[in-house]
Amino acid sequence: DTEVTQTPKHLVMGMTNKKSLKCEQHMGHRAMYWYKQKAKKPPELMFVYSYEKLSINESVPSRFSPECPNSSLLNLHLHALQPEDSALYLCASSHMSGNTEAFFGQGTRLTVV
Amino acid sequence: GQQLNQSPQSMFIQEGEDVSMNCTSSSIFNTWLWYKQEPGEGPVLLIALYKAGELTSNGRLTAQFGITRKDSFLNISASIPSDVGIYFCAGPYDAGGTSYGKLTFGQGTILTVHP
């Protein structure tokens, strides 16, 4: 099973709303990631979790707040977003073995209105 | 930081034609990955390359890890309509280290296949 599951698939939110994106994997991967992707552009790394601890924050604004409740779950809490934050948000996971293959979820298409 | 230069940016081909795309970098990479992304979906890993000179196939797809470690190519033979999508090359963000999936991506090649 090489599946990373993200929910919801689509989300529309107002600029004053609070919402959360969820990601789950059962591959035993101990590294999990959030990427942001604009249309026809490559994914851009936002956060990296290693063994449930935040190891990398790529200077992401504080209106994005990641959380890793356990080794299988990764959340991204959203608050006071701007229309320019509209994008496809991708979760990914990988082994911590030096093998750099990352497996991606299908993404959450976020629209901020 | 490291950059991956991917070309061509887009390709419009007829069904049955072969396709070739490549990725180059000014830095050495220890791993090259090729992903395909279809509209509305996340990237799917097609091929992973770990050794300089390595040639790996996955069905109609063939990818090679360049001898200099600074380039890789992906070929698709006898293209079919379901090959449409964006193809990305990727490598570890820290070219020499074990970045555990923190990836640098090329800009992507948009492939359109006409029946």
Image (tube, grey):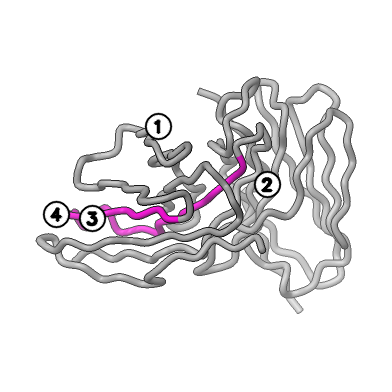
Q: Are marks 1 and 2 in contact (CB under 8 Å)?
A: no
Mark 4: secondary structure: loop
- Along the line of sight, the residue nearer the viewer: B30 or A99: A99
Q: Residue B38 in the image: state x and y as whole percent.
A: 59, 66
Q: Which residues are magenta?
A: A73-95
In this rendered view, identify the residue nearer to me: A4 or B89.
A4
> Left or right of A48: which side holds B34?
right
**Distance between mark 2 and mark 3 Cα atoms:** 36 Å
User: Residue A78 shows which numbered tag?
Assistant: 3
Label 2 to label 4: alpha-carbon separation? 38 Å
Q: Earlier in the sequence, mark 1 or mark 4?
A: 1
Q: Which residue is mark 1?
A: A56
Task: State which chain disc 2 sits on.
Answer: B
Q: CA distance from mark 3 to mark 4?
A: 7 Å
Q: What is the crowding at mark 2: few (fewer than 14 residues within 10 Å), some, or many (at least 20)?
A: some
Q: Nearer the viewer, residue A74 or B17?
A: A74
- Circle 1 crowding by C-alpha within 10 Å: few under 14, some 14–19, many from 20: some
The magenta stretch spans residue A83: yes
Viewport quadrant of the C terminus of chain B:
bottom right
Q: On what subunit does the disc labeled 1 rest?
A: A
